Structure formats: C-alpha cells, structure tokens
Amino acid sequence: MGELSSGVRVARGASLLLVQGVASSLVGVVYFAVVARLLNVADLGRLSALGLVSSLFLTAGTLALPSAIVKNVSEHVGGGGLDEARGVFRSAIRLGVGLATACSILCFAASRPLASYLLGADEYTVLLNLLSLDVFLAVLLPFFSGGLQGLQWFGWFAGVTLLHSVVRHSVAMLALWGGLGLTGVLYGWIVGDLTATLLSAALTLRAFAGKKSGQALRSLLHYSSPLYVSSLLGYFLTSTDRYLILLLAGQAVLGIYSPAVTAFGVLALITNAMGSAIFPKLSEMFGRWGRGSLGGVAKVSSRYVFLVYVPLAFGLAVTARPVLALFVGDAFMESALPLVILCVSSALTCGVVIVNNVLLAMGRTTVFTAAGLVSLAVDLGFSFLLIGALGSTGAALARAAVILVSYAVPAWVLRRAYCQGVDHAALIKSVVASSIMALTVAGAQLVWSSKYLLLLYVAVGGVAYLGALRVLKALNRDDFKLVSALVPAKLHWVVDLAEKALT
C-alpha cells in the first residue's frame, strides 16, 4: 500500500508536468513551424547556433546548483527541517544572482568572436549583445524553479513553465510576423524568461521568507560539483554534433538538422516532466527512510515511463515524414531519417530518467562524470567519422551512440552496486507493442499517404498499441487503481471500462 501511495503522489506530480509538457510542446511546434517558414534555412541554422550559446551559459553558469536545491530542500522538508530548507534556498539564490551577472557580462564581451565563428559574420554581433540580456535571466530562472520543485509545488511549477513557453514563443512569433527577424526572436526569449523569473521569484521568496538557519554553500557545492562536470559533459554531448556541423558543413546543413533535433526535443519534455516529479519524491524518501525505500518507487515509475514514452517515440519515428511535411514544410524532408534514428535510440533507453534520478537521490553524482567522459569520447569519434560523409544523418548516428552509452554506464553502476533497476519486463512488452503499432501505421501510410492524414495515423496507431498491450497482458489491476486515484470520481466508470477492455 505504501508503494502504491508513493506511486500515486509521483504519478500525480508527473501528470501535472506531463500535461504542461504536452501543452508547451504544442506551443513549441506552432512556434517552430512559423520560424521555419519565415526564416531561410541559413537563418534557421543561425537561430540554432544562438540556442547553443544560450544553453552553454545556462549549463556552465548554474554550477548544477538547481539540482542541489531540489535535493536538499526536498530532503529537509521530508525530515521536517523547514529552517534548513530556507537556508539552502536563500544561500543558493544569492550565489545565483552573482553567477547570472557574470555570465551576462561574459556573453556581451565575447559577442564579436562568437558572431564571427558561429553566425558567419561580425554583422550579427548585435544578436549576441541582445542574447547577453537573456543569459542573465536564463541562468537565474532555474534557481527559483528548483525551489518550487523542492517544495513539490508541481502545480505552480507546471503553471509557470507553461506560461514561460507561451509568452516566450508568442512574442517571438509576433515579432517575426512584424518583420524583425532573428532580433524579434530574441525579444521573445527575453520577455518570456523575464516573466517566468519574476513569477517564480515571487512564489519562492514568499515561501522561504523568515529567519533562516545557518547554511553554508559547501554542502550544496559538494553535491553539485561532480554533477556540474557531468552537466558540462552532457552539454557537449548534446551539442557537439551541431558545433561540428557548423565547422564541417555550415549554417545551411545545421538548418536542415535543426527540425529533427527540435522534434526530438518534444519527446524529451515528456521524460523531463517525469524526472521533475520523480526526483523530489525519491530525495524525500531517501531523507526519511534511506536507500532501501527507493527500489519499489523506482520500479513502479519505470513501468509507466516505458508504457507512455516508448509508443510515443516509435510513433514519431514512423510518422516522421508527414510530421515534418506538415509542420515545417517539404524543404526539410532530409530531417526525417535523423529524426527516426534519434527516436528509436531514445525509446530503447528511456529508463535513463529513472536510473539517473535514483543515483541523484542517493548522491551518487560522480557516476555521471564517468558516463559523460566515456560518452564524449564516443561522440567525438563518431562525429568526426560520420558528419563529413553523411551530414545530418551522420550527426544523428553519433548522437544515438551517445544516447546508448549515457544509459548503459549509469544502469550498470546501479545494477552492480545496489541490485535495483527498472522494470525490464514492462520495457520488452512496450517495445513489442510499439513495434506492432509502428508496422500498422507504416502499412496505413503505404495504402494512403498524406501529411493531412496525420491524426488518422495517430488514431490507428493508438488502437494498435492498446490492442497489442491486451494481447501481451501488459496491464494489470494496479495500473488502473493508480489511474483511478488520479482522475475525478465521475470518470471512474471510464477507467473501469478501460480495465475490462484491456486486461
């Protein structure tokens, strides 16, 4: 009963964040469709390069402290130490303001060389100057968001995150329609990040108001230091392909590759939402009951990650061409194969969200440094070998290799050291059911192929997946008990009907 109760709390938080992630994804899809049609391919590559710079400062500038905030606040709240949680948060925020300021100044100072190398000409320096304003907000925001997650205020966190996405993308699209080009996109970034930062700050500073206990930053930095190294490695692992495309092929090829990475990023929002809910709960349980309490929640959580994520990834892979044709146009059809490669590799390794968060909750952050070093070596080797010959497809193959290694190393450590892992039976059944779904949808496209039939393909795939789950007996009564606990009582009859149909 305890595991089910914990599963309900995790699932409720994950549900809120998943709904937010889906809504944000829809906004992002509309935004990217508009951007792809209003910018030429080279400018789309330059926009991707600006995103790389922003992500670099976000990764390097936070020192991985937001994760330390989530863990420590959750642990202290779980142990009844609100004063200690207040001290953790307020100490981290003061450092966060300093880090954000330093990153903004550095970005402004480096504007000209960055524009010359990444954007192709000094004339784009003004874009980097504008980006330096956004960098301050982008680095500071995760500190306040970490406070919301640590308090497990998932409703507020989801609401602020959704508002952030809506404002950021809406202002950028309006500016593009107004003829402001890349400058207008940056205006959207600034307005969206400012809105989310101010709202998150208002919520968290009020929650942590009052006299704080003494809290040195040493404990936070001790936890975050190895995680920071792995975060930097992770940044380069997810960005090396695009930097090397700029070096070896130019902005136009990066513009072709960007839709695949963007569509793949929509899937990542789902695992991010699940991880955002799972990590605070695991940290709280670790603070209360120790390592032995994590195994049950981890296994149950992994089951639902597999049942939800794998079919979505396979579904996006099999509909890659109509998805790209519908949302970004026929000019980007070369992005289809890279997107398929990325989706399939992530589907097979989506248990990483569980493995990583269990290790994070136990403070085993050095594992990620080792995994990052191995993955970086693999990434560089495959990238130099494949990008020059295969372009965007080679970049996708290199990233797929990184995805596989980044999962294998932490999973091996967790399995060997703690004998705790994910629900492999659920993974196998989900992969089999998703493969049946993909073959069914591929057959439907052969019979009648049109980008305007995407919703029909989704419906056919959904029916095929659920039917395969029934044949494989992948669902049980506990699954539907969990769903019943999440939905209003008036909808329990729907859950009961689904249980009869699928078990």
Image (tube, grey):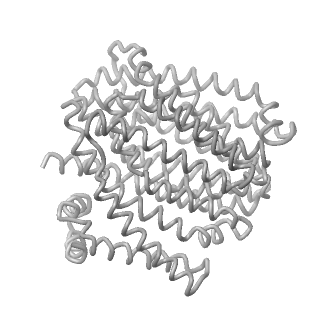
Q: Who is closer to the viewer here, 498 or 203?
A: 498
Q: Is residue 22 left or right of residue 292?
A: right
Residue closest to the far left: 1
Residue 48 lies, with reference to residue 501, above or below; the image says: above
Residue 214 image offset from top left, x and y in percent: 35, 12
| Residue under the point 47% across and 24% down | 93
Which quadrant of the figure has residue 498? bottom left
Residue 290 lies, with reference to residue 477, above or below; the image says: above
| Residue under the point 34% across and 21% down | 210
Q: Is residue 455 left or right of residue 421?
A: right
The quarter of the image holding the C terminus is bottom left
Residue 416 image offset from top left, x and y in percent: 30, 36
Q: Is residue 482 left or right of residue 173?
A: left
Residue 28 image offset from top left, x and y in percent: 58, 56
Residue 456 visible, this orientation: yes
Which quadrant of the figure has residue 179? bottom right
| Residue under the point 52% across and 33% down | 231
Q: Who is closer to the viewer here, 376 or 8?
A: 376
Residue 187 visible, this orientation: no
Q: Is residue 486 left or right of residue 114?
A: left
Residue 186 lies, with reference to residue 476, above or below; the image says: above
Q: Who is closer to the viewer here, 170 or 487?
A: 487
| Residue under the point 36% across and 19% down | 87
Residue 452 image offset from top left, x and y in percent: 59, 79
